[in-house]
Amino acid sequence: MARGVHVRPIVQSPGTEPDPVHASARVVEGAVALVKAELRLVTSEVRTRALDVAVSMALAVSALAVGQVALLVLALSPALATIQPWPVVLGMVGLPAILALAIAVAAVRRMRASTARGAPRERTARDRSIEARAARSAAPERRASRRAASERGRLAEAPEYP
C-alpha cells in the first residue's frame, strides 16, 4: 500500500446533480478505507494468535521440564530413601509431579481456548434473518441505481436535433 496518498474529500453542494466521477471516487475511498481497516484487524488477530501459541508452547515445555525433574527424583528415590525418611522423599517426588500436572492442565486449557476462539461459530436463525433483512433493504437501492444508470445511458445516446 502506498503511504502518503491523500485524496481530498469531495463536498457536493445541495441541489446539484451528483457527478459520476466524484461518486466513484467516494466509492474507491470507502473501499480503500475498508481494506485498511480489515488489514489492521487481521494483523491484530495474527499477533494475538501468535502470542497465544507462544505462551501455550512455553507452558507445555515447562510442564515437560518439571515432569522430567519429577521422574529424575523418582528414579533416585531408592538412593534418597537411605538418607531421608520416606515422607520427605515422597514430598520430593510429589511436589514437581503436582507442579508439572498443574502446568500441563494450564497449557491444555490455553490451547483449547485459543482454538475455540478461532473456530467459526454456527450461524443461528437470528443471523440468517438479519442477513435476509439486509439483502431486502439493499435491493431497492440497487434497482434505483441501475435505472438511473440506464437513463443516463439513454440520454447520452440520444441524437441531438438542431
Image (spheres, rainbow, N blue to C red):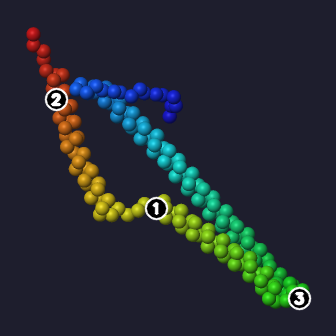
Q: Quadrant of residue 24?
A: top left
**Sooner in the amino-acid sequence: mark 1 or mark 2:** 1
What residue is rendered at 21% in x and 31% in y?
149
- Return the x and y of residue 104 as percentages of the image width and height: 64, 72
Q: Is residue 157 left or right of residue 75?
A: left
Label of residue 151 in the image: 2
Residue occupied by mark 1: 119
The crowd level at tag 1 (other Cα within 10 Å; few <14, some 14-19, many 20+) is few
36 or 78, which lies in front?
36
Relative to 34, is 93 above or below? below
Instruction: Classify residue 26 as left or right of residue 134.
Output: right
Q: Position of residue 30 (x, y in %)?
A: 38, 37
Please say if 25 is above or below 130: above
Name the residue at 57% across, 51% down. Answer: 47
Measure the C-alpha gap from mark 2 to mark 3: 100 Å
Query: On residue 92, which mark appears?
Result: none
Residue 114: x %, y % from top left: 53, 62
Out of 112 and 14, give the one closest to the viewer: 14
Q: Amino acid at mark 2?
A: Glu
Which quadrant of the view contains residue 94?
A: bottom right
Q: CA distance from mark 1 to mark 2?
A: 47 Å
For disc 3, the marked residue is: 82
Residue at figure coordinates x 52%, y 52% from the top left: 45
Secondary structure found at label 2: helix
x and y percent of residue 42 in the render? 49, 48
Residue at coordinates 53% horizontally, 65% vertically from top-left?
113
Amino acid type, callout 3: Thr
Type of the residue with mark 1: Ala
**Does the residue at mark 1 contact the one at mark 2 (Cβ under 8 Å)?**
no
